[in-house]
Image (spheres, helix red, strand yellow):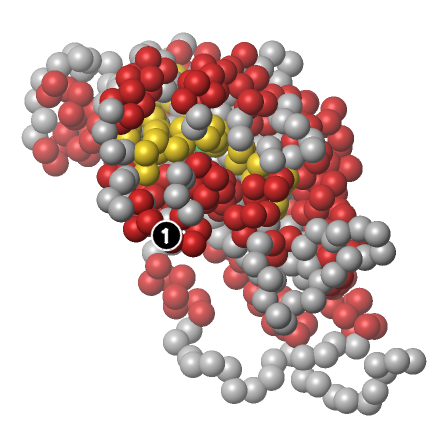
């Protein structure tokens, strides 16, 4: 048999041994999944306590028994992690992970294709290609687009940003760089509610943060299109070079959708690149009654998606789509002499190292592809609709409680705050206190491990924020929220008033 020489390597595990070891790991993990709902979301342990578990030793000098090792590390992870697969985890935009995704990652690691080049990963490349087509189809984008699986939403947005920069800059920026503009400044427009990736993009790609021209939002927290038109007009009268408008399909704080069709037409009128950050909300296109503005995604030059959010893929899996594949490839394709990935028969191969910043690439698409095969569009429609319905239900449940103030509900995000009934809401002094109270309450809730919200700031109000991208959450979990928040809220209020000598 080719390659079956007699070398003994310390890392090798014989197939029978591997099978029995893997079975043990599978038993441990399924036991963990079974006990998930009965565990606390987090134990809120200190970094010092966690470090103590690992000990202070240097790099291990000697071998360890893999069986013992896997048992030890399973315990470490199960008992000292924040469990985002818990039914009551609703922080940030982090989902419960689809179990089939874990099996996909396992398979992908065992076969270990390098999805940088077709010849190194024939079937994996085709699966990634098919996944990209499916994802585009799901959000109503042209399935003939170019695309790439990346590590997450940030990276998807960064890739699109660079393609936009290369395509729309009036000088040869890829060759001459930013200085080729002889002092002219490239300008990107984004609303105040845009996710923080925009800072990294402006910095990483040499534009500088001053190149972001912030467009205010309206009273529903959507980008104000009239203000955008004005800002572009203003810049065109100067030496500035507008090149990109970023719209968001589901903002990170409150889940609102920008007026995407209008932004698309402004971009068309002014010859600008239109990018949609759909990392959180793009898959809301599957809702029975999706926000009408999501239709504007179809008109974007590029879209960022994030299967590790609302498609419940285990981390990491993001995806960027670019309407004209050629532009994506032109941005990243270089041909060093040491890569000879030529034609395969009649076909030009897809070598994904030419489509993005990574060279060697793992097989991220498999877990996304498997989950899509497992439940199909129907399954995703149901889970996404259920999540949105639960968020609406939370808004309703919170609205009915005298000590809670419901603030916003959009897609699957609901925001609210704890308000002690004796406070005179609206006065500057009380609002300041309420912000402090809710920020402290959030810390207590997060460390307490009963439920895990995160926060948003809505019109200056510090809000508790539940984002339900969690197929394990039920109505019972939602109904538990007011009792937990009010109980911990009262306690926090008592402590704070005592400490600050707060009087009405
Ligand atoms: C709208 C939006 N864009 C981008 C991101 C960043 O995504 P990731 O954390 O996968 O990089 C997020 C994360 O919550 C988001 O909500």
In the image, residue 257 above or below residue 185: above
* Image-based side of 19 in relation to 263, left or right: right
| Image location (x, y in percent) of residue 351 | 67, 55
Q: Is residue 34 visible?
A: no
User: Which of the pair 426/252 is nearer the observer?
Assistant: 252
Q: Is residue 152 visible?
A: yes
| Image location (x, y in percent) of residue 181 | 31, 45
* Image-based side of 78 in relation to 406, left or right: right
User: Which of the pair 166/100 is nearer the observer?
Assistant: 166
- Residue appearing at x 24%, y 39% in the figure: 210
Q: Residue furthest right?
A: 1
* Image-based side of 286 in relation to 349, left or right: left
In the image, residue 412 above or below residue 184: above
Q: Is the C-beta of the residue carrying label 1 under 8 Å from the nearest atom of ligand 1?
A: no
Q: Name the quadrant containing residue 199.
A: top left
| Image location (x, y in percent) of residue 224 | 34, 16
Q: Name the quadrant containing residue 321.
A: top right
- Residue appearing at x 24%, y 24% in the figure: 237
Q: Which residue is mark 1?
A: 177
| Image location (x, y in percent) of residue 352 | 64, 53
In the image, residue 426 above or below residue 189: above
- Residue appearing at x 65%, y 58% in the figure: 116
């Amino acid at each position: 048999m080719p390659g079956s020489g007699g070398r003994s390597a310390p890392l090798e595990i014989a197939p029978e041994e591997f099978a029995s070891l893997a079975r043990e790991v599978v038993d441990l993990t399924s036991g963990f999944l079974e006990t998930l709902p009965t565990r606390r979301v987090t134990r809120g342990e200190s970094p010092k306590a966690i470090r103590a578990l690992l000990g202070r030793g240097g790099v291990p000098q000697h071998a360890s028994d893999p069986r013992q090792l896997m048992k030890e590390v399973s315990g470490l992870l199960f008992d000292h992690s924040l469990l985002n697969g818990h039914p009551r985890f609703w922080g940030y935009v982090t989902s419960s992970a689809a179990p089939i995704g874990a099996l996909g990652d396992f398979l992908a690691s065992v076969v270990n294709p390098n999805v940088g080049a077709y010849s190194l990963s024939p079937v994996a490349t085709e699966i990634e290609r098919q996944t990209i087509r499916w994802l585009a189809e799901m959000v109503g984008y042209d399935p003939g687009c170019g695309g790439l699986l990346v590590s997450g939403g940030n990276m998807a947005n960064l890739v699109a940003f660079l393609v936009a920069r290369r395509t729309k800059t009036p000088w040869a920026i890829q060759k001459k760089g930013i200085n080729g503009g002889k002092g002219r400044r490239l300008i990107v427009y984004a609303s105040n509610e845009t996710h923080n990736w925009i800072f990294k993009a402006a910095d990483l790609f040499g534009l500088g943060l001053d190149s972001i021209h912030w467009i205010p939002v309206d009273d529903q927290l959507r980008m104000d299109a009239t203000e955008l038109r004005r800002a572009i007009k203003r810049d065109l009268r100067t030496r500035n070079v507008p090149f990109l408008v970023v719209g968001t399909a589901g903002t990170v704080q409150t889940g609102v959708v920008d007026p995407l069709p209008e932004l698309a037409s402004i971009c068309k009128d002014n010859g600008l690149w239109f990018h949609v950050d759909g990392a959180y909300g793009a898959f809301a296109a599957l809702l029975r009654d999706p926000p009408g503005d999501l239709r504007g995604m179809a008109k974007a030059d590029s879209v960022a998606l994030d299967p590790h959010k609302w498609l419940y893929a285990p981390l990491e899996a993001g995806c960027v789509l670019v309407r004209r594949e050629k532009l994506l490839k032109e941005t990243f394709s270089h041909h060093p002499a040491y890569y000879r990935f030529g034609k395969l028969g009649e076909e030009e191969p897809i070598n994904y190292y030419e489509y993005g910043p990574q060279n060697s690439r793992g097989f991220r698409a498999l877990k996304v592809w498997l989950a899509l095969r497992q439940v199909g569009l129907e399954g995703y429609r149901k889970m996404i609709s259920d999540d949105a319905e639960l968020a609406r239900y939370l808004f309703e449940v919170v609205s009915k409680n005298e000590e809670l103030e419901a603030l916003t509900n959009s897609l699957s995000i609901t925001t609210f705050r704890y308000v002690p009934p004796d406070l005179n809401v609206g006065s500057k002094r009380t609002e300041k206190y309420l912000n402090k109270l809710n920020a402290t309450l959030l810390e207590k809730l997060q460390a307490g491990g009963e439920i895990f919200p995160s926060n948003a700031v809505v019109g200056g109000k510090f809000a508790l924020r539940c984002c339900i991208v969690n197929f394990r959450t039920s109505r019972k979990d939602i109904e538990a929220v007011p009792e937990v928040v009010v109980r911990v809220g009262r306690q926090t209020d008592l402590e704070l008033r005592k400490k600050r000598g707060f009087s009405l």
